[in-house]
Image (spheres, helix red, strand yellow):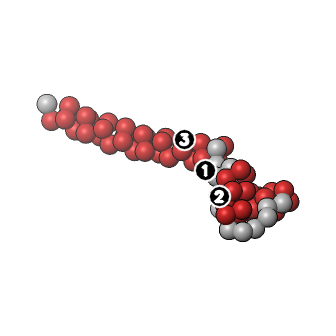
Amino acid sequence: MGITIFVGIVMLLIGLAGGFFGARAYMKRYLQDNPPISPDMMRQMMAQMGQKPSQKKLNQMMQMMKNQSKK
């Protein structure tokens, strides 16, 4: 009886740890593939700040964000 409870608790802890790390890896990959900010959103934000966004500037900012997320 005691061994059954012990094994159950150990399996529960292993399942929780595995689920946590699995979900973390999934979300990391999802956010890398689908960044929360798109170039269109960036263009709108720059226009609201009074800047005229050029394609070169947008590409630079998106690359900076991509590099920042890799660190």
Residue shown at 84%/60% (left/top)? 54
Crowdedness of circle 2 by 10 Å Cα count: few (<14), some, many (20+)? few
Q: Earlier in the sequence, mark 3 or mark 1?
A: 3
Q: Nearer the viewer, residue 71 or 51?
A: 51
The residue to which callout 3 is attached is: 26
Residue shown at 72%/69% (left/top)? 50
Q: Nearer the viewer, residue 71 or 2?
A: 71
- Distance in Å between CA atoms under marks 2 and 3: 15 Å
Q: Nearer the viewer, residue 9 or 59?
A: 59
Res. 4 image quadrant: top left
Task: Find the residue positioned furthest to the bottom.
Answer: 50
Residue 51 at least partly seen: yes
Q: Amino acid at mark 2?
A: Ser
Q: Nearer the viewer, mark 1 or mark 2?
A: 1
Q: Quadrant of the N terminus?
A: top left
Q: Is residue 46 left or right of residue 52?
A: left
Q: Amino acid at mark 1?
A: Pro
Residue 45: give x, y in percent of width and height. Answer: 66, 60
The residue to which callout 2 is attached is: 69
